[in-house]
Image (cartoon, helix red, strand yellow):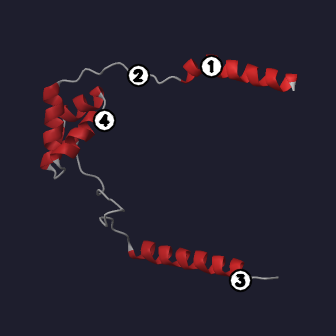
Amino acid sequence: MREGCRSLLVILVFAVFAAPLCADVVPARRIVAEAEAAQVADRLASLGVAARTAAERVESLTAAEIEFFASAPRSVQVAGAEQDFFTGQSVNLWYESLGGAFMLATGIGAGFYMISNRE
């Protein structure tokens, strides 16, 4: 009993002193020219991205990336489509839908077999 309490105490002390090692690292604030960021956001908006989404995308870029895209605005291109599976805005190809139906039927069949198998 005494050894178990001692071990628990050692783990507790280690956890207390090790907690700062897992602290979040806050990066330095990046310095971005607002004009360049606005130029990249405008380019995204001209390609059909919503203004709010464009601002969020530009916010996620690094300063070097913003500088690059501002210097070459034609390099900003839309790649892929925005998809939201929970509002029905996703587009599946025919074989993806067929594969999904097959996997669903296989899973239901395997579950039914496991439940009804009384050996």
Which circle, 4 or 1, is nearer the viewer? 1
Return the disc, 2 or 3, that comes first in the chain's sequence: 2
**Could you say which disc has been placed on residue 16 in the image?**
1
Mark 2 residue type: Val
Measured as percent of width and height from the top left, residue 109 is found at 62, 81
Q: Residue at x 63, y 16 (%)?
A: 17
Q: Is residue 79 left or right of residue 117?
A: left
Element marked by disc 3: helix
Q: Amino acid at mark 3?
A: Ser
Residue 75: image tag: none
State the mark number for residue 26: 2
Disc 4 residue type (three-letter): Ser
Q: CA distance from mark 4 to mark 1?
A: 34 Å
The quadrant the C terminus occupies is: bottom right
Question: In 3D space, how far apart are the residues under numbered discs 2 and 3 (Cα atoms)?
Answer: 56 Å
Instruction: Give the SS element for disc 4.
Output: helix
Closer to us: mark 1 or mark 2? 1
Residue 82: which quarter of the image? Answer: bottom left
Q: CA distance from mark 2 to mark 4?
A: 15 Å
Numbered disc in front, either 2 or 3? 3
Q: Nearer the viewer, residue 104 or 8?
A: 8
- Indicate which label's residue lies in the foreground, 2 or 4: 2
The answer for how far apart the CA atoms under marks 1 and 3 are is 52 Å
Viewer-proximal residue, 82 or 3?
Answer: 3
Q: Nearer the viewer, mark 4 or mark 3?
A: 3
SS class of the residue under badge 1? Answer: helix
Q: How many marks?
A: 4
Q: Is residue 56 left or right of residue 103?
A: left
In the rendered structure, which amino acid carries the disc numbered 1? Val
For disc 4, the marked residue is: 60
Residue 116 got which mark? 3
